[in-house]
Amino acid sequence: MFEIVHKETMSAGNVFLHEIKAPKIAAKAKPGQFVILKANETGERIPLTMADVDPEKGTITIVFMAIGKSTALFGTLEKGQGYQDVIGPLGQETHLENFGKAVCIGGGTGTAVLHPIARALKNEGNHVTTILGARSESHMILKDRMDKISDSLIICTDDGSAGRKGFVTDALKEILETEKPDIVVAIGPVPMMKAASDMTRQYGIKTIVSLNPIMIDGTGMCGGCRVTVGGKTRFACVEGPEFDGHEVDFDDLAKRLRAYGKEEKEALEKHKCNLDAAV
Amino acid sequence: MKKEDSPRKVPRQKMPEQAPEKRRKNFEEVTLGFSPEMAVMEASRCLECKKPLCVEGCPVGVPIPEFINLIKNKDFSGAVRRIRAKNALPAICGRVCPQENQCEGKCILGKKGESVSIGGLERFLADFERQSGNIELPKKDKSTGSRIAVVGSGPAGLTVAGDLSVKGHDVTMFEAFHKTGGVLVYGIPEFRLPKSIVEAEVGLIEDLGVKIECNTVIGLTSSIDELFEEGFDAVFVAVGAGLPKFMEIPGENLVGVCSANEYLTRTNLMKAYDPNYDTPAPSGKNVVVLGAGNVAMDAARTAMRLGAESVKIVYRRSMAEMPARKEEIHHAEQEGIEFVLLTAPSKFVGNKDGFLSGMECIKMELSEPDESGRRKPVPVKNSEYIIECDLAVIAVGSGANPILAKKEPGIALSKYGYIIADQATGKTSKKAVWAGGDIVTGQATVIEAMGAGRRAADSIDEYLSGGDF
Ligand SMILES: Cc1cc2nc3c(=O)[nH]c(=O)nc-3n(C[C@H](O)[C@H](O)[C@H](O)COP(=O)(O)OP(=O)(O)OC[C@H]3O[C@@H](n4cnc5c(N)ncnc54)[C@H](O)[C@@H]3O)c2cc1C
Ligand SMILES: Cc1cc2nc3c(=O)[nH]c(=O)nc-3n(C[C@H](O)[C@H](O)[C@H](O)COP(=O)(O)OP(=O)(O)OC[C@H]3O[C@@H](n4cnc5c(N)ncnc54)[C@H](O)[C@@H]3O)c2cc1C
Ligand code: FES
């Protein structure tokens, strides 16, 4: 078992942080890489990015939103309990160098994925401007951690309950017009990554996004994670998950993410009924 | 022996099976195995040839006439012990080996009539032994203190691990998935090979002292050099050929088009057919499967069991060229799978939400045989038509998985990405690293992977006892 040594509940109660004992993975993991977790014998294999690693303590940290049956189940796991299986580190590490001025954009739980990348960019000597977006203040995650590693932090909420009212792309537009960043990293919901990439394309600024297609093995064996990048089919688990945002076919990704919509809704309903029956 | 008792007069025993109408709705095993009486009867057919060709046909050299003779004398335990000395996975091999091309293909009885059902007998013995609970493992040699890492837990890896453990070495097997067995657990369906049987046979390998570390992707979790740094003296690589091939035709990324690997992994490894498991299976009412090998048969028969209304195998050549085992084709036909032959897909079409709704095909005809002797399919002009479908499973072969290869530049690869290893020993171009199974040969068979494992184990043992690399 991979034990959970620390747990936090964040953002309106449906985003969770688990720090998990996994020394071998912690010793190896690089920014941008992910793990696949399976809670128990009957569970699904779910990919999640490592939001943090502590090689000395031998732990990795994941931050996830409970959106379907499996992540809801993950959310019920408490400190002292654990995951039956954790596999990793998987995927390519982020390409890091001192680009100069970097703008890092995080939306929703994408902020968790962004965290280690932004920190690594900072460590490489980049000037890091971070833009975080969420529906409202209570949906914002990892604000303090992101603040610590950024040279400047811009907060956007849809309802104006924190920071500025509006989308992250509004803030991005201003930066693109005033100072020319050398690189943009945008991680969040598919529509957000698409909007950010469309915008930076007009300014010719390299943009990295992190894709979250459906995965099973995470080792290039099933092809379930295929995405269209630059007109070619790529396997996100081994060639990604990060790609050049200007080349990604986001509409294709959005469609493929709907593959199990019906089954998952049914599963979640059933899961809730069972939970209700249990209490 | 009276004339009418001559082995040639006893007909080959037919293994009982679940009826097609019943089995197409369940995942339970299709064939049910011989009873002891049937096994003895079948064994009585063996001619006990002086020069047994069947043994030559077996890549791991199971002493076939010897074990069959013991069955004749009803010494089932003695018989299974004979097999175990050469084959650590008899319940698996008895079920999935293409015996018709190997041992049984060489049987003298088969020249004029029907060969001895060697696979059926092997399976009978292994099941008999497992059910009796009285399993005698080979005796282990004294500990040598040498440590071996085996990468991949399919039939090649399991064989190396078992063999080297018997020879007294300390073996650790690393597996990327959360379960051991390779294709035996993620690919071959439950109705052909129950997973409880794989678990039991893997369990015996563990009983021999082999340590197993799942969830470990060598190349990512640890590199081969790191394994050496950790104190391993030799490494055997058996990562299989699991890279799915696609058709590279338009529409392939529509929802509802998937590789056989994805489809089979979801159903077999992740048990999508069992409502107690959380992984969903791609659901399809009208399913097309592309390809005509064993993998295609498995995918089609799985789709039937998952509740499809129609399942079609679409293949560009004719029945005669199908690479799948005859028995599997026959089983598929019995279960109601349709064969759409001399037909090739040209594109997938979808609805406005990006879900598959049909597949455009073109009819083919076979032209004159080419240099390879096979008649080449050529498209018939203007014969395009659409097959309506909501799930397409692509089963047209697989390639070498690049993960380990990319991270290990020291291991020489063929131009298709397979590891180059010496045929007789399994040695690669990297010192103290051996390889075998599908990652060397491309997709082959369970028993060939085991044969490669056996040869590599001998070579590794020789190296560890002071030999050169
Ligand atoms: C490389 C990678 C990194 C990720 N990192 C994070 C992270 O750090 N934090 C976070 O909150 N989320 C992350 N995700 C997304 C997360 O994996 C999905 O939200 C999760 O799989 C949903 O599972 P579910 O069963 O609870 O939800 P549902 O949406 O109900 O289930 C969808 C089903 O389809 C599949 N599925 C649907 N959407 C996804 C998806 N986006 N990814 C994978 N499988 C999916 C799964 O098989 C699942 O059974 C990441 C995804 C990838 C591929
Ligand atoms: C659907 C299907 C049906 C088949 N039916 C038959 C049949 O009826 N009869 C028959 O004889 N053959 C059949 N075959 C072929 C047979 O299964 C293979 O030839 C055989 O399994 C090859 O064995 P292997 O040990 O080389 O590799 P595999 O069985 O492929 O095992 C390789 C293992 O290595 C693991 N791995 C991969 N990369 C890494 C890594 N980097 N680190 C750690 N582990 C890793 C994989 O997860 C896997 O478990 C079938 C194949 C398929 C796909
Ligand atoms: S997740 Fe299976 S190939 Fe990427």
Image: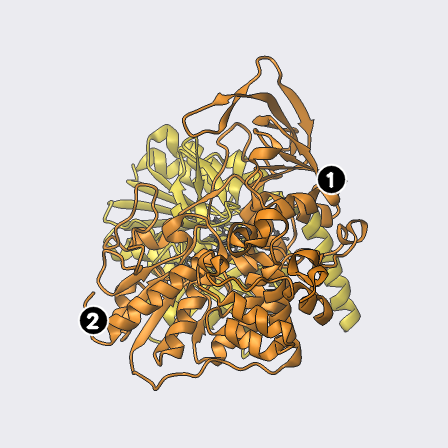
Chain colours: A yellow, B orange
Per the rendering, the mark at residue B285 is 1
- Whether residue B72 can be seen here: yes
Nearer the observer, A236 or A16: A236
Tell which circle, 2 or 1, labels the residue nearer the N-terminal end: 1
- Residue extending furthest bottom? B142
Q: Is residue B231 above or below residue A130?
A: below
Please rate how many residues cluster around mark 1, counting C-alpha atoms within 10 Å: few if below 14, some from 14 to 19, many from 20. some
Nearer the observer, A137 or B191: B191
| Identity, as a three-letter code, of the amino acid under mark 1 | Lys
| Identity, as a three-letter code, of the amino acid under mark 2 | Gly
Name the residue at 46% across, 66% down.
B215
Q: In the picture, residue B135 is in which quadrant?
A: bottom right
Residue A2 horizontal/vertical position (percent):
49, 73
Give the labeled residue for mark 2.
B467
Give left or right: position of B151 versus A269: left
Name the residue at 29% across, 67% down.
B459
